[in-house]
Amino acid sequence: MTAFGRTILAVVAPLLLIAAVAVAFLAADPLRPLTGSAPPVEQVTVERHVLDGLGIALRIRAGGTEPMQIAQVQVDGAYWAFVQDPPGELARLSTAWLRIPYPWVVGETHKVVMVSRTGVTFDHTIDVAVATPGSNSLGLLGLVGVFVGVVPVALGMLFYPALRAGGARVFGFALALTVGLLGFLLVDTLGEALELAAEAAPGFKGGAMVWIVAALAFALLMVAGRRGGSEIGGVALATSIALGIGLHNLGEGLAIGSAFATGAAALGTFLVLGFTLHNVTEGIGIVAPLIGERPRWSVFVGLAALAGLPAVAGIWLGSYAFSPHWAALALAVGAGAILQVVVEVGGLLVRQARRQGASWAMPSAVAGVFLGVAVMYGTALLVQV
Amino acid sequence: MKSLFGLPVTRRLLLAGSALLGGAQAAGLALRGEAAQPHGAGHLAPSTPPSAPTSTAHAMHGGMMTVGEVDHARNGFDPHAILTDWDVGTVRRDADGRPCREFEIVAEDKEIEIAPGVMFPAWTYNGRVPGPTIRVTEGDRVRVRFRNRGSHAHSIHFHGIHAARMDGVPGAGDVLPGGDFVYEFDAFPFGCHLYHCHTVPVKRHIHKGLYGAFIIDPDPARHPGHEAAARSRLLGTDENKDWHEFVIVMNAFDTNFDEENEVYAANTVAHAYSKRPIAIDRTRPVRVYLVNVTEFDPINSFHLHGNFFDYYDHGTTLEPTLRTVDTVTQCQGQRGILEFSYKNHEPGLYMFHAHQSEFIELGWMSMFDVRESVA
């Protein structure tokens, strides 16, 4: 046998043994005395609800040890007619829509209880019933997205001439400010991702998924960013920042959209204005690495779109079609991307300080970081959804 | 238009919610009306006229109904059969020549379908919930051979007059799995009674399904001055044959064992008599033997639509204890007899149900289908 053949055997033999053990275990079912008479574990996660002229529709995802069946549905303590689409048993992690022709009452709370075949019940509360935005309100919602995403980033970028005029000290301060605001966004995005992961079907192991995806996104973006062999700066760094902020704004859009759709927040002018203020700082952060360069105006437009337009997509998805695990995944990628730009902007800040012969921990830099965090936190108080 | 839900639904939703129950006569009516959504209602299809109210039971519930059908054959009992299947036992002569009614009751574990698709791990007498309706005559010697083939200790505690050692409680007629016991007593007093398991923990043994109706018909010879009333109650007499007689055991099931009921019913199966109303020949008077064994809720009730009834609490009198009422409440274990007539009514579907709306909407909703005649 050749050395190659032996290597193949050394890989294949353990795999075959693993398969054999699995087959033997399934055939012998040695745990039967422990589990034989216990009913199967069942789980239902409601991923979305849609309220419209036909009543209430719930998108559910099954969990548990065996395929399960929704036998009956109660709404507000009354058994109600419903149609399951697709019908039949729900395999683990499969989804279905339950359509219930229930005359819901606008502005009031409704409680839906699903009764499984084994009599286990699963609750879903619609805190405040409002009609789910239809396709005819996409334009209006998109406008909201532009106001909370694109407009503030573009406005923030208008500080660019002032930053350029300020010289090296202002450049260092602007970078420090950017680190601060990105630090806030990192924490905020991770928190949001973990919150959504907790709402997702337990079978997805959402918490672990968020951490792993964030780490992976961070590593991949670091590798991609430095494939030239050195730290990134200038337009490349600005683009990375815009991407990270864009993914964060996607999450912000999802939160606004779903809060709007579920009636958790009245989307008032004040709230939109709050988001606009909150996100102005992001524009400053994106253009900070560009102070030493003279990019064309189209670069600024591109960066504003990259950072701001995901808010529009987020609001659309959040108001109608998102599932918590996908949203958590997107935000985890965002967290990884933001961490990457924190590292890169931090590196640039250190190099900048060294060039000036100063420590990275000089007072202006520390003040900049703190101001970045403080401004983000302060304006976040305006926009609780 | 026909909607996804199989109901004649127009695309607007009544948001005010006022016509939910009482007002909504036609199916889908609750889904019609003026929309007030902040979004999305603008260019929906205009309302189509409501479909004419049909005379089917299906049309009367709006959307408020369990979905699907219970497999009565698999359950081994049908709520419609339970209404009238009296178990009168087997008459034997004892050594001293005295007649005695003998009954066989077996306790067994059995999974039953209490609402379409919802299975409940019940404990049963003779494989059914409620257990057999035992019907004897006042003064009969009654002998019940009880075999416990269930997984836990059980007993039969009869509501009636008997000796302490026949009481079916821990220490007197409590039977271990695999064991037997014979309960023996004279049937007194006449009335509408019940029997149930009294093994501890009692709450669980009752709500798992161990109960049934126990009817003692009055012996006319013992009630001079009330012979006619007694004869009409006594099964098998010509006077009795004229009556529609039904037994209705009001029960409920806690399917997730959180000490609150998920399903309420008359004779176990949610909505059994609203999906298939009980046929009534309007010329015949109606007598309902009503028993409440609902656990966790202190009371249950019975409300009759479009009619009033006389009520005999416990059924132990031949004169009504309440006259001309349309609602009666019963505590846990309380029971009584209702008498009413549709003689002067037009045919149609007449509801009866608990008057706790919560119980109605969770399954305790029923109907009489009053007809000119019943084949």
Image (cartoon, rainbow, N blue to C red):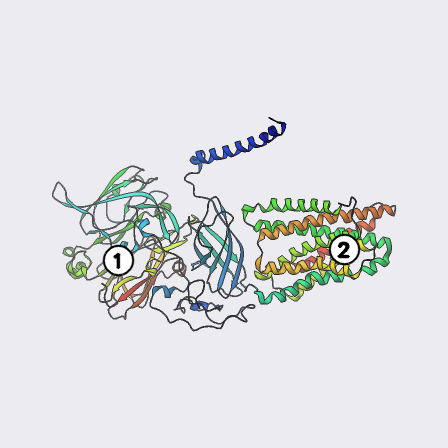
In this view, the residue farthest toward the right is: A357
Judged from the image, the secondary structure of the residue bearing numbered disc 2 is helix
Q: Mark 1 points at which residue?
A: B246
| Residue B167 appears in view | no
- Pointer 1 indicates a residue of which chain? B
The reply to whether discs 2 and 1 touch (Cβ–Cβ < 8 Å) is: no
In this view, the residue farthest toward the top is: A1
Relative to B132, residue B344 above or below: below
Q: Position of residue B303 (x, y in %)?
A: 33, 63
In this view, the residue farthest toward the left is: B97
Q: Position of residue B176 (x, y in %)?
A: 31, 37
Judged from the image, the secondary structure of the residue bearing numbered disc 1 is strand
- Residue drawn at (40%, 71%) of the image: B51
| The quarter of the displayed image where residue B365 is located | bottom left
Q: Nearer the viewer, mark 2 or mark 1?
A: 2
In this view, the residue farthest toward the front is: A1
Which of the image's four quarters has the N terminus of chain A?
top right
Instruction: Answer left or right for B191 relative to A36.
Output: left
| Residue B296 appears in view | yes
**In front: B261, or B30?**
B30
Q: Position of residue B62 (x, y in %)?
A: 40, 65
Relative to A365, residue A102 above or below: below
Q: Mark 2 points at which residue?
A: A285
Which of the image's four quarters has the C terminus of chain A?
bottom right
Relative to A14, residue A225 above or below: below
**In front: A363, or B196?**
A363
